[in-house]
Amino acid sequence: ETGVTQSPTHLIKTRGQQVTLRCSSQSGHNTVSWYQQALGQGPQFIFQYYREEENGRGNFPPRFSGLQFPNYSSELNVNALELDDSALYLCASSSGIANTGELFFGEGSRLTVL
Amino acid sequence: AQKITQTQPGMFVQEKEAVTLDCTYDTSDPSYGLFWYKQPSSGEMIFLIYQGSYDQQNATEGRYSLNFQKARKSANLVISASQLGDSAMYFCAMSVYNQGGKLIFGQGTELSVKP
């Protein structure tokens, strides 16, 4: 049990719609990172939040946005959904940004875009 | 640019035998960390083992050990005494310290343990 929880676990959207995915970080962790994992691929870094501020972003367009709240939980928002956005979205939490050790992942939110 | 390469899309191993999963990495930064994660069909990424670039000893965690060869830029995972529950996808990943907490993942290796 890692303590990182994500919701919803599965969802289906249509092209052009918007989606919000949620993540509750492990107790005591102030850093949350989001990853996109397409079928058969390794996860790709989307962005990281540290103490409510974005701290690093991967090669994703601006329609991918996020938030981190004072309790360090986080949201990932994707606007104008495209078919290629279909993927498993993983949230990971850690204590600090340096990531010199274990990074705890949730079970992910599986998004299907039709 | 940083990169992780896993050249084995799939591997088979007999139960109770040892297996080595290959991982090579590429970075010009001297400070980095190397990780192995297990991903069962449920989707959760389970942390297995970590090796820092300055660590002198190879990391070990129970049945998992990381064979770190810095000059060759390789970080192979060795699983001893394979169990049926070890069947899963395995990902090698790297974090470069001056780039924050971003993990760069390889494509993964699917391990199947035969009874």
Image (tube, coloured by chain):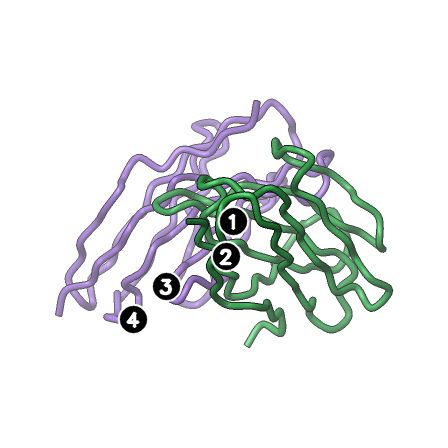
Chain colours: A green, B purple
User: How far is mark 4 from mark 2, CA to CA?
Assistant: 17 Å
Q: Amino acid at mark 3?
A: Pro
Q: Chain of mark 1?
A: B
- Look at mark 1 in the image and give the residue it sits on: B35
Q: Amino acid at mark 4?
A: Gly
Residue at point 49%, 62% (across, down): A11
Q: Answer with mark 2 or mark 3, whichever residue precedes in sequence.
A: 3
Residue A45 is at least partly visible in this image? yes
User: How far is mark 1 from mark 4, CA to CA?
Assistant: 20 Å
Number of the label disc, if any, that sits on residue B49: 2
- Look at mark 3 in the image and give the residue it sits on: B40
Task: Say if A110 sits above or below B42 in the image.
Answer: above
Q: Amino acid at mark 2?
A: Ile
Q: Answer with mark 1 or mark 4, whichever residue precedes in sequence.
A: 1
Q: Position of residue A55 (x, y in %)?
A: 78, 42
Q: Amino acid at mark 1?
A: Phe
Q: Please identify the quadrant where the N terminus of chain A is shown.
A: bottom right
Helix, strand or loop for disc 4: helix
Q: Answer with mark 1 or mark 3, whichever residue precedes in sequence.
A: 1
Asked if labels 2 and 4 touch by Cβ distance under 8 angstroms, the answer is no
Residues beneath discs 2 and 3 located on the same chain? yes
Looking at the rendering, which quadrant does residue A103 occupy? bottom right
Task: Say if A106 sits above or below B108 in the image.
Answer: below
Q: Answer with mark 1 or mark 2, whichever residue precedes in sequence.
A: 1
Q: Chain of mark 3?
A: B
Helix, strand or loop for disc 1: strand
Q: Which is in the foreground here, disc 4 or disc 3?
A: 3
Residue B26 placement, left or right of A92:
left
Helix, strand or loop for disc 3: loop
Residues beneath discs 4 and 2 located on the same chain? yes
